[in-house]
Image: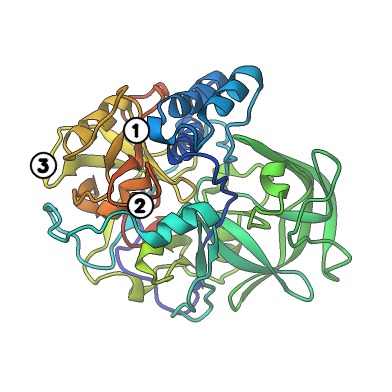
Amino acid sequence: METAHAHPAPTPGRVAIPIRRLAGHADPSLHPTVVTAQHANRAHKRLAKFIGRSVPDVQDLVSNIHRAVTNLPPGLQKRYNRDVILKLLASTKISTHLGENAGAGASAAPVQASLTSSTSSPPNATPAVSTTPSDGFSPADAAASVNNPLTPANAVSLTHSIGLGIEGNDIGYVGDVMIGTPPRSFRMLMDSGSSDLWVGSEFCSNNGGSNCGNHTFLGPNSSSSFKLLSKTWSITYGSGHVTGELAQDIVMFGDLTLPSHMFGVAHNESNDFAADDIPLDGILGLGKKELTTQNVATVLDSMYQSGLIQQSIVSYKIPRLADQKNDGEITLGGMDPAKYASGSVVTFPNVNTQGFWEGAIGAFKVDGRDLGLVNRTGVLDTGTTLLVGPPADVKAIHAAIPGSKSSDGVDWIIPCTTTSVLSLNFGGQDWAIDARDLAFLPIDPDVPRGDCTSAISGTLPFGGETEWLVSAALPGPTRMPDVH
């Protein structure tokens, strides 16, 4: 088994792409419990693909939305059009929304690699109950959950760096990649759960035959170095798809350049990508090469093979909107030493056989108390908003968080003011999740110190009792090396 070094790579030959949080299209007429159910549906579809199981039935996903609408608090039912939405659910085939960012490939031979995690401050071996009083749900997060701004990143500290921005209330992360001649900036969703790079074509159309919205496109009219390879390509996501052809052009990450990288240009995009209010121009997949649907070298492979980076490693510094630091960053080739505490790096094996990033979870603790959940694994995914796990595990976690409640044992509510600490053990080290990241959205947006929907979901029995999907909630950078 090849193991990554447990220390940062030297600065030369490393490129950092700052990660920008991605804004999606929020509908203020949808109650937060419905929005949470949409995110849960998307996460369940991703997890099913990641672990090689059947994607949940559409009816199961729709029933999640129906349950969320049915259980709206009486005082909010009229405000959020409960009866109207229930009629629509009963009479039409609705989209469960929030398109999947990446599909899993077919089963592959086990890929042996290792994952490294670190934090910006030394983690506690046994996290205790937080002693910091909570002011409730962050006003910045509340506003962003409705307006879904794209919050730009600050300038990054590394040479060859591009900053990472934030979508809405921490629901996605975007980096700017320069493509073509002259080079133009493309806003790319950074996704550890896929391996393909694609952007929209100049000739792109949506499902209705119209153009692909207010985005940046690539083709011979905008880039003199663009070359179409006349090889078709397509990818289908949980609730969206793109089709097109492979192309070749100059791709730049900070000051580092791939002079003739092959990737996809989409001639057709579903509205999940083509709508004007989708704040991305394409997707940059940073999973392993086994996942590519284009059958070309991934960006990480190309950089490593061309000698631009000395290690085939991608690491993430995930920002948090409520912190107002805007310090997100993706680093290719190593880790940014300014983003983690010395001595906090832990290495553990990648146990996934599909090409995703998955590690063994040694323990789950709430406020330092071990819940006895053993033999679990977690897929680390930058494209997921919630933490998703087996319903029995999710119930055990909420039972340990004071003030948690559920009317049906499926959808969970926690106090917006919770100070409880959930920690997951990777590589023999407990990694505490900030209490602010456990409260997803307030039940009543006008009461930020009341009840919130939980960011821990177990709404579907997706067939496994040991697998978790771990969102970007873990603190500090996570380092994911490839193997050649």
> Considering the numbered disc 3 on the image, is that residue within a helix, a strand or a loop?
strand
Q: Secondary structure at mark 1?
A: loop
Task: Please name whichever residue, 297 or 20, is drawn nearer the observer in this view of the structure.
Answer: 20
Tag 2 or tag 1, which sits nearer the N-term?
A: 1
Residue located beneath label 1 in the image: 389
User: Amino acid under label 3?
Assistant: Arg
Q: Residues within 10 Å of mark 1 (few under 14, many from 20)?
A: many
**Where residue 365 sits: x, y (%)?**
17, 42
**Label 2 belongs to which residue?**
473
How many numbered dots are placed on residues in this image? 3
Horizontal and vertical percent for residue 471? 40, 47
> For numbered disc 2, what is the local secondary structure?
loop
Tell me the kind of residue under disc 2.
Answer: Ala
Q: In terms of sequence position, does the residue under pointer 3 or pointer 2 come before the other? A: 3
Looking at the image, which residue is at 65% across and 23% down? 93
Q: Is residue 43 above or below residue 286?
A: above
Q: Earlier in the sequence, mark 1 or mark 3?
A: 3
Q: Residue at coordinates 59% horizontally, 34% vertically from top-left? A: 238
In the rendered structure, the answer to whether residue 467 lies left or right of residue 108 reads: left
Residue appearing at x 51%, y 52% in the figure: 146
Q: Quadrant of residue 341?
A: bottom left
Q: Is residue 41 above or below residue 249?
A: above
Q: Which residue is mark 3?
A: 369
Left or right, 11 with respect to 262, comes to: left
Disc 3 crowd rating (10 Å Cα; few below 14, some 14-19, many 20+) is some
Q: Is residue 308 left or right of residue 72?
A: right
Label 1 sits on what residue type? Gly
